[in-house]
Image: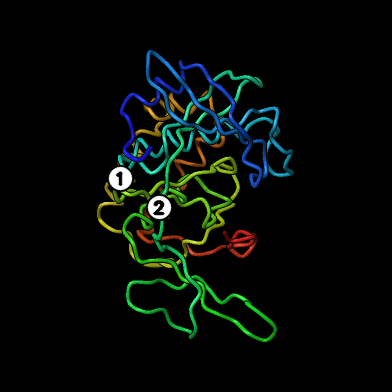
């Protein structure tokens, strides 16, 4: 599916879920499924809480809720960067259920290039070892869709923005997936999208951040939606990150206390 059905959330939440296979490259249990409801059917990914691998820096059994929280924040931005995602019961218990997105072949968002400076239309991430005594420059596209995703990642404190989590579609949209390690109250931002680090945020992004700040107030609508999904401390930290982005007016810089780029990067 490429163009997202506006009622996809209802289909995901209420439909009958049938497991068709397992996505083996996923670090946690991720099942490829179909969901059917009132004559409609769609492919989706179901990640049961019971299949979550324990992590030292995230409480057990919370990754599914974080995935849904990332979707809710994405929707609040108006950018629609995360596929429809719900928390529901399934064949293996409660878990995250997310609409499957078909990607467009040949869409180039990341590359390894020779030299120390990127070509026009690209942003440098950093040097990568590609063989004995040889390095190449890792770059990402200077793409408005990626830039919006970089802002979203800074808001939700995404600790794992890899290249394989970027899904460009045939209709020109871009989705980000795999948001289980987000919303930590401590700084965990780890991403490939550092090309705009230190640059002024676009005016559009500043407007979105102002709306998020209001929606994340103590009685704000986004706070209400997030409360069952993440802790109050994590909601407060999210609002603090939004306020920091607004006060500095720039894309964040990589931190020094945490690896800035995920590994493997794709």
Q: Contact, CB < 8 Å: mark 1 with mark 2?
A: yes
Quick one: quadrant of the N terminus? top left
For image coordinates 60% across by 82% down, the residue present is 135
201 is higher (above) or lower (below) than 38? below
Report if residue 231 is visible in the image.
no
Which image quadrant is residue 223 in? top left
Whether residue 37 is visible to the viewer of this picture, yes or no, is yes
Quickly name the residue at label 2.
151
Question: Which residue is at 46% across, 36% downward?
Answer: 100
Dot 2 surroundings within 10 Å: few (below 14), some, or many (20 or more)?
Answer: many
Q: Depth check: give the residue in front, 51 or 195.
A: 51
Q: Which mark is residue 208?
A: 1
* For residue 130, side relative to residue 43 (left or right): right
Give the distance between the C-alpha atoms of the residues marked 1 and 2, in whole angstroms: 10 Å
The quarter of the picture where residue 27 lies is top right
Total tally of numbered discs in the picture: 2
């Amino acid at each position: 599916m490429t163009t997202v059905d506006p009622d996809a959330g209802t289909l995901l939440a209420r439909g009958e879920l049938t497991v068709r296979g397992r996505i083996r490259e996923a670090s946690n249990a991720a099942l490829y499924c179909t969901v059917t409801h009132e004559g409609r059917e769609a492919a989706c990914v179901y990640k049961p809480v019971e299949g979550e691998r324990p992590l030292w820096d995230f409480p057990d059994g919370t990754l599914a809720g974080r995935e849904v929280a990332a979707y809710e924040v994405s929707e609040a931005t108006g950018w629609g960067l995360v596929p429809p995602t719900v928390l529901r019961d399934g064949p293996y218990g409660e878990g995250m259920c997310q609409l499957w997105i078909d990607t467009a072949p040949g869409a180039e968002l990341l590359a390894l290039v020779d030299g120390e400076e990127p070509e026009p239309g690209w942003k440098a991430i950093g040097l990568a070892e590609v063989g004995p005594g040889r390095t190449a420059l890792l770059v990402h596209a200077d793409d408005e869709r990626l830039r919006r995703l970089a802002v979203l990642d800074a808001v939700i404190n995404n600790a794992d923005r890899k290249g394989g989590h970027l899904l460009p579609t045939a209709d020109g949209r871009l989705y980000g997936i795999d948001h289980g390690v987000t919303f930590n109250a401590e700084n965990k931002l780890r991403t490939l999208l550092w090309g705009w680090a230190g640059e002024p945020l676009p005016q559009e992004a500043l407007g979105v951040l102002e709306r998020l700040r209001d929606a994340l107030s103590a009685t704000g609508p986004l706070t209400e939606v997030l409360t069952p999904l993440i802790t109050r401390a994590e909601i407060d930290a999210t609002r603090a990150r939004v306020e920091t982005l607004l006060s500095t007016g720039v894309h964040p810089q990589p931190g020094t206390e945490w690896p800035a780029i995920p590994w493997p990067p794709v």
